[in-house]
Amino acid sequence: MNKCDYSPSISIVTPTLKRPDHVKALLENLSKQSYLPVELILVDGAPVEVKSTEEVVNEMIVGLPFNVNYIRHGGGTAIQRNVGLEEVEGDLVAFIDDDIRLEPDFFAKIVSVYAEDQDKVIGGIAGYITNQYLDINKSFHWRVYRRLKLFKTYEPGKYDYETGYPINRYLQPPHDGIREIDFMGTNCGVWRREVIDRGLRFADFFVGYGVLEDAHFALRARKQWVLLECGSAHCIHLHAKSAREDARLVARKTAENYRYVFMDIVPKRSWKQEFRFWRVQFFDLGRFFVYALIHPTKNNWLTLLGKFEGILHAISMKPTQIRSIK
């Protein structure tokens, strides 16, 4: 097949919750793509009596250059995306969050990379969020991580299988190339349909507020597929305030969810791997404690409490629990 003849259809899956203004802006943004999607599957987690997002969709749907499949379903972003995946019709499946804004050539850039993949080994391609670059030399806790040698790798987008931690993809400076990664987020990634058709879904463990569900999804895919970052496929993240935000809960998830992913992705771990994992957890607990002492706000103390609760629960997690909730 000539790559010039490659014109896959694209389905977009977007979970949302009580953010009608962001949904409106997203619909406008997607309409400006030089390579248009065929559909947006919008999964609204708001209670049925909250109709603001539905009203936005109904107002705009007639003038959109793609179909909108509006679904109401709660359970958190991971569960909502699973619901959306059951409805996709496209050759490629994009996860685009409602507070992401794509450059007009975003999908065109992604499709051009897939067009080069004659052997169909690429399972997913992530874009690059230009306003999320994190200079490791200017990040205090990442400088400390590196100085203490807490991780075995510091390559952005790689999963440290020896410690159980994904290395922040945005430690990678902006670039226009293609590079291989171990995991990708669900805010601006495009997946080959075959990955979905083979049964890959988000684990039910991530019901409610999601932390690391995207890395877990990608790491499972990575066992069979190549994952890439396309540095020239640009977008920005508006970092809209989530209706689910809860400092205590989020901090708890940074222990429980990281433990779940490590146990599932690396089921046979040495004592050194276990030591490295818990060393980072307790280091972060101490870091949160010091920060709360210096900045004694309610949220900072709740963060410390949540981290402590999460570590206690993570310690008690058993391999049988991991298997039972896949």
Image (cartoon, rainbow, N blue to C red):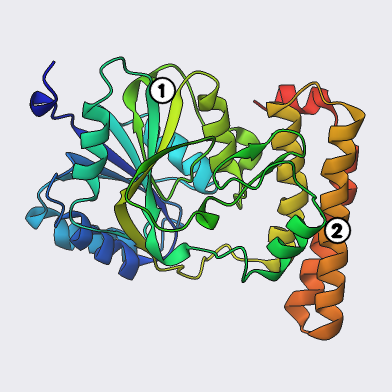
Res. 283 mark: 2
Report the amino acid beneath label 1: Val
Write down the residue under mark 1.
195
Q: Quadrant of the N terminus?
A: top left
Residue type of the residue flagged with mark 2 = Phe
Quadrant assignment, res 67: top left
Quarter assignment of residue 237: bottom left
Q: Residues within 10 Å of mark 1 (few under 14, many from 20)?
A: some
The image position of residue 102, as x and y in percent, is 27, 57
Mark 1 residue element: helix
| Camera-side residue of 141 and 253 | 141
Q: Residue at 76% of width from left, 23% of height from top? A: 267
Within 10 Å of the Cα at label 2, are there few (<14), some (14-19), or many (20+) other Cα atoms? few
Distance Cα–Cα, label 1 vs label 2: 37 Å
Camera-side residue: 141 or 318?
Answer: 141
- Residue 290 on image: x %, y %: 86, 75
Instruction: Name the secondary structure under disc 2.
Output: helix
Q: Is residue 218 above or below residue 246?
A: above
Judge whether 125 appears above or below 45 on screen: above
Left or right of 212? Residue 193 is: left
Question: In the visual, does 169 lie left or right of 237?
Answer: right
Pinpoint residue 249: horizontal percent, then vertical percent: 71, 60
The residue depicted at 50 percent of the width and 54 percent of the height is: 172
**Residue at left offset 57%, top offset 62%:** 244
